[in-house]
Image: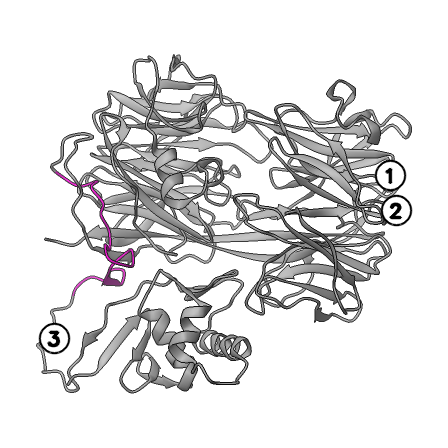
Amino acid sequence: MAPRIIQFGTFQAHLDSGELFRDGIKLKLGGQPFQVLAFLLSRPGEVVTREELQAALWQSDTFVDFDHGLNTAINKIREALGDAASNPRFVETVPRRGYRFIAPVDRPVPVPPEPAPVRPPAPAPATPSRKWVPLAAGAGAVALAATIGLAVFGSRPPAPIEYKLTQITRDSGLTQQPRLSADGNFVVYTSDRATGKDLDIWIQHVSGGQPVRLTSTPANESYPSLSADGRRVAFQAGRWREENGIAVIPALGGTPKLVAASGLYPEISPDGASVAYSSGTNLQASEVRVVSTDGGEARAVPAGRDWAMAPLWTPSGRDFLIWARGPLDYWMVPASGGAAANTGVSKRLQDSIGVPMSVLPYFHDPYPVASVGTSGIVIAARSGDGHDLWYCPLSGGRASGPPVRITAGAGAAHPSIAANGRIAFSRLSVSSGLWILPLEPSSGRATGDLRRAWTENVTVAYPNVSADGKKLVYVSNRGGDPDVWIRDLETGVDRQLTSSKESEFRAVISPDGASVAYALKGDAFRSQRGDAYILPSTGGVQKPVCRNCMNNVAGWTPDGLGLIYYGGNPLRHATFDLATGRKRDLAWHPTGHIHNLRFSRDGRWITFTLVAEASRVLYVAAVNNGGKPESWIRVSAEGQADSSFWSPDGNLLYMHREGVLWARKLHPETKTPLGEPFPVQELNGPRFSAIFSANGLTANALYFMMDETTSNIWLADPAAN
């Protein structure tokens, strides 16, 4: 019998001999680690639970520590594959459940030990590497009906199609947001490959050849759209911190023409004559507008929605799909204007995935990026721990069937469909790290260069620094499941404080640095309450604070006698007194959500962000006025602050917006703003995204988490039937 071999990337797993090879070279992996790998490979894209692995590979009467044995096996697999838990390419940890093999896998095929000789092919021009693989794992590889020959939004059920994957760019930075020409032969996209600091628009033939750079300004050009005839490219143009405009440029190169002074997410019509786009901002987009690709006066497209964005032309050019609220979903609206009809795509996805559509946008995209085919819509959306493409059939402008998952753990985003069913998409990878900015906190003056706090490839979530700047508490899955860790910032030594199969969430260190509080979160998306615990920062026995009481511990009160937590709908913040167990609301609003609440060091003031469906505003309030919006002090314009925190003296408020750290002076007594915000530090360009925790500011530095996103463009071609 011919040996059974599974191919994934450059690796080959020989199932019969229990050996792993890379490019023909045998790797050191055998025994139980290989058996675990083989078990994962047998179910690519699926979650394999720890219990399933235990039942299949560990004897029931063994006294070996199963948890330790499985963790060791997974670590050896990752070592052999050059993989990392913090940025997995092959084996992904699914917290509280198990593991999932996320790379594309060839089915096991018999390979003859001595293949018959074949005539070498004639030389051909170099093209990107190709391999036949199913894009999605499981019973149906793909059921994508965005193919040729179907009536627009017809009702014929989709037939399963296998896809051939082709990587067409190989950049080390951020290359993303592809849009195909109608025939699928050309792709336009945005990339920072030229400078590493800003995004430009590029175009190339999908079969290879030299990419052509269409723009070369210091602005960030993004969200390109290619006309059906391949002659024009529309794109979103704008510098950091400045308003975006809509521009059009010839696909062969030339001078861009600004056709709209402000706008977002352009989409060229199928006939190439018009560009549809969103007015306003991500949080204030009020309507869809259409303007000629030659410029001129734009016309509004009335849709009966008070907030709409990201228009997508249907192939006929007679209608749009728009991302609008009431409920938040894709809606169908005539291109000439008229009442919008809800497609029901959000409800279909929620039923299939179990996650509300409002939390599905991928990475930094403010909406689920999608593309409309001849019979349905393909959406890039987050589902659990993965980011994938989903196909939802449409008939008569309504979701007509259950969504079908196209990719499994591929990190897929920004889909674009050509008329022949070819799909281009971004395949993104995010690495999280801890960064440090030397800073004089009372003046807002940076005193050194922004740098990584450490260089190890370790996933760091919710970093929290003690007031003296000597201890750092964080959550990491380096041991398999998310656990609480602490680092001595003077010696660089890490210690693991918790070890369990549960997911510890958002650990926070007390003001005196002696204790660490955290919650065991019940469910990240359904907001089920969990248990709260405290343990010494030196390690030891954890002490339960309360059971089924809170799903997030957001911080400590300044006196160290209570915890801050949040929950409810709308979201509100409250305190929990550790001595009495008494709960007290801190900040709430009748219709808006309270985010990122921070105490001033003296405990008299709080700052927070009020998030409504179409606004995001930063406020300061006295502690006793958190439920009195009329007394709140506004310190930012709408959409101009994502998070904030206080200087030690309380006279400066730091805020983060669009990749820049800002600061604003406040009156020492009333906390009313004094002057305009001023920039403190730009945070490294479009591929980086900073996240600021509750306690990141010390006497001389700011610690924060920053994600670095890298991406390349891939094609998925339907196999010939």
Is residue 135 magenta-colored? Answer: yes
Picture residue at 29% right of the left edge, 56% below the top: 136
- Quadrant in the picture for the N terminus: bottom left
- The image quadrant of residue 664 is top right
Q: CA distance from mark 1 to mark 2?
A: 8 Å
Name the outermost residue toward the right: 669
Find residue 281 and report its horizontal and vertical position in percent: 52, 26
Q: CA distance from mark 2 to mark 3?
A: 77 Å
Secondary structure category for the residue under label 3: loop
Picture residue at 29% right of the left edge, 44% below the top: 187
Left or right of 581? Residue 188 is left
447 lies above or below 235:
below
- In this rendering, which labeled residue sits more in front, label 3 or label 1? 1
Q: CA distance from mark 3 to mark 1?
A: 77 Å
Q: Main secondary structure of the magenta part?
A: loop
Per the image, the residue denoted by label 3 is 120
Task: Residue type at mark 1: give it.
Answer: Gly
- The image quadrant of residue 469 is bottom right
Chain-order first, disc 3 or disc 1: 3
| Foreground of the two, 303 or 215 | 303
Is residue 289 magenta-colored? Answer: no
Task: Residue type at mark 2: give it.
Answer: Asp
Left or right of 383? Residue 433 is right
Task: Residue type at mark 3: give it.
Answer: Pro
Secondary structure category for the residue under label 1: loop
Q: Residues within 10 Å of mark 2 (few under 14, many from 20)?
A: few
Find residue 441 and report its horizontal and vertical position in percent: 83, 45
Residue 158 visible at all: yes
Per the image, the residue denoted by label 2 is 559
The stretch of residues the image draws in magenta is 124-148
Per the image, the residue denoted by label 1 is 603
Are dots 3 and 1 in contact, CB under 8 Å? no
